Image (cartoon, rainbow, N blue to C red):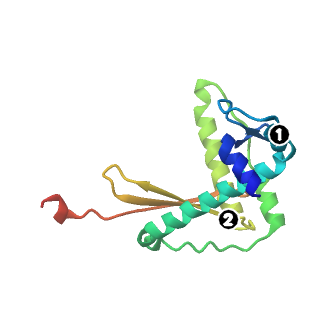
Amino acid sequence: MDKIIEMVEKYQIAAFQEGRERRIRVDSSIARTPADVEYVKSHKREIIQYLDAESDRRIAEEEAKNREKYAPLIAKLPIRNITNTPDEMKFRELMSQINYHHFTGREDDGLNLSISAGNSRIRQEASQFCSHELKTEYDYQYTQDARMRVVRTISCPKCQLYIRDEVSEEIEIEKMFS
């Protein structure tokens, strides 16, 4: 493992996705020895695993820092209790009623709006019977006036449930007029 870390640092190796395959890129401005080239070629899979693990570690560290920094705002987010009675048959039956037609003429905008509204009602009813695969994401931002803001999105890819909550720091008026 030490040799892999040494090679990654020495040659500034980076991993990238090309189609379905993971590849590595080596800084071409650094002179390479034939032995190092062979080592990198023969240990490509381990290098990619190391780089991916390092990337995951850095992301987790940053998430932990943000969680700590934005903890007071996260506590202010509303509690979302998403309750339903999962019924796969009823869910599939409702989702099969969704209309996928799309009209392209200028005068067809009303038809497209009507279809979209109908589909939205169907999805809303179907979400009551979905066995949700909920995914919660936090986005840590700043407002235009430099206050901290947290945006939480809760989504389900099956029924397209999407809930967005946003909380930002309060404006401190005393500081504005001091």
Q: Position of residue 132 (x, y in %)?
A: 72, 66
Q: Residues within 10 Å of mark 2 (few under 14, many from 20)?
A: some
Could you say whether the residue bearing mark 2 is in a helix, strand or loop? loop
**Residue under the image location 58 percent in, 25 percent down:** 106
Q: Which residue is mark 2?
A: 134
Quarter of the figure with the C terminus: bottom left
Point 66% across, 33% down: residue: 30
What is the distance, in whole Å, between disc 1 and disc 2 at their CAs?
Answer: 49 Å
Residue nearest the observer in this picture, 148 or 88: 148
Q: Nearer the viewer, residue 174 or 58?
A: 58
- Callout 1 crowding tier (Cα within 10 Å): few <14, some 14–19, many ≥20: few
Q: Position of residue 137 (x, y in %)?
A: 58, 60
Which residue corresponds to the image point at 49% horizontal and 63% vertical from the top-left?
66
* The quarter of the displayed image where residue 127 is located: bottom right
* Label 1 vs label 2, nearer the camera: 1
Q: Nearer the viewer, residue 104 or 2?
A: 2
Which mark, residue 111?
none
Q: Which residue is mark 1?
A: 35
